[in-house]
Structure formats: C-alpha cells, structure tokens
Amino acid sequence: MKKIVKKGDVVALIDSNFRKFIVDTNNKTDKIKGIGVLDPSTLAKKEYGKQLKIGNKSFWILHPSLQDKLQSLSRRAQIILPRDASHILMNCSIESGHTILEAGMGSGSLTLALANAVAPSGKVISYDIREDFIEHAMKNVKKARMEQYVFPKLKDVTKGIDEKELDAIIIDIPNPYDTVKPAWNALKMGGYFCSFSPLTSQVEKTVIKLHKHNFIEIKTFENIQREMVVSAKGTRPSFNMLGHTGYLTFARKVLQT
C-alpha cells in the first residue's frame, strides 16, 4: 500500500551521502543548507520511500525516525551521541509515562531521545543556566515536533531541584558531583542518577559523592564504537572509529547503604 506525504507532514530527506534533513511541509519557501531553495509544500503527494530530484540532487523521502531527527540536529553545543543516549535510556530504565529531569540542555540531542522514550504520557524537564542554549535546543525540539513533552527551565541544578519523585535525573554539566545531594532529594525511591563527563577527574569526584549518599549500583562506562565495512571482497573494520566522547556514571537511590 502506497504511503503518500500529506500537507502538514514532517519528512526526512536523505541524500546519496546519507546526510539527513528534517523538513516541515507547512514551512514557506526557503534556502536550506545542503538542499538548496525548496518550497516544502511541493513535497505533498510524493510517495514515501521513493527518490525525488531537488535541483541537481536526489533525496529519499521518508517518515523521520528518532535517528533521523538526532542526525539532522542543528548543533551549537557538543551533543550526546546516539550510542551514549541509548545507553542512558537502558541503564536509567526510562519508559513511557516517566518524568525525567536533564541538566545541561545543550543542543537538545538527549532531550529528543528522552522525549521520544517518555511519550505520549511522560515529560522531560530541562534545566540550563544559559537562555541562548535553551532557545536553540527548543528550536530543534519544535522542528522534531516533540515540544509537548519538553519543559525547559532557566535554572542552576546545583542550587536545587524544584520537582520531586522523579524517575531519573541526567546531568551533563562540568561539575556533576555538585548535583548528587539535590538529585537524591528529588528522585523517587529506586530512581536513577546519570552523569555524562568527558574527564576521569569529574567521574572520580562524582562517584565519591555518590558513595557518601544513599546510592547503589554505582558504575561507570565508556562506549567505543567501530563500524564494520562489508563488501563482496571481504569485511574489515572501518578506519574511522568513534572513539572517546565521555564517561557515563549511573547510580540508583535507596534509603540506606
């Protein structure tokens, strides 16, 4: 059965190099970097899965997946990559209906992954101390049409957390160790703490603080990813390995240790 683009759809355009662009068919004609001048309304009535020509380039047109939304993100700050985001979702047991707090919104990459996981009945509360980061991240969130699940706040998480009974708290700031006490106070019993840190010194200070409070299952991971190049002539590892991004530290709230 054919699936046709309807007026008002948000679509993913993927070029021959697998670069991805999220386009709202409600938008006005504009010049889009990587595509060229495009009237998005002309995408209506096209068939999903087929290629179409825009200028001298060809694009597949598809329903945007979470991966498409993350890979097409407009970056201003360093983002948490999908490989780390997926690890956060699993190790914090994030599910539909949960209420999650993140601190350090950046460009909104993790925000989108969290919102996708808690939808349609949960919510993501996003603290950041920079209003320009919040504005930029929310542009990405709105472009992905996930804004109904995201509630940004201009607030320093180290000064306290307003919300209580949170299912998980994810920290992406330079001093995550200063959030351990307010995080314990804000989490529900059995709720999860996670911090993303590029430096081992940050991890060490955070883990020391976690041990001083009532947290268990304290563990830290580094995710290294290497793609395999598969061809008719044979298979080999890609020369372009995704190396160090940061360390993920997880812990779980209890009453006593």
Image (tube, helix red, strand yellow):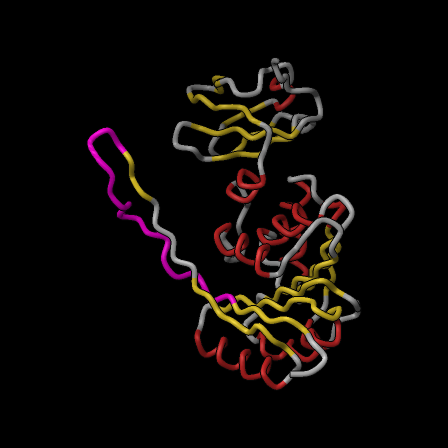
Question: Would residue 246 be counted in the magenta stretch?
Answer: yes
In this rendered view, identify the residue nearer to me: 70 or 195. Answer: 195
| Residue at 61% across, 86% down | 212
Q: Is residue 105 visible?
A: yes
Magenta extent: 231-248
Horizontal arrangement in the rendering, residue 150 relative to residue 251 (left or right): right
Q: Residue at x 69, y 73 (%)?
A: 183
Residue 136 in view in this figure: no
Which residue extends farthest left?
233
Q: Quadrant of the C terminus?
A: bottom right
- Measuring from the top left, give residue 104's x and y in whole percent: 61, 63
Say which quarter of the image contains residue 154: bottom right
Coordinates of residue 61 in the picture (x, y in percent): 54, 24
State whether residue 255 is above or below residue 87: below
Residue 58 is covered by the magenta coloring: no
The percent position of residue 203, horizontal first and vertical second, equals 49, 75
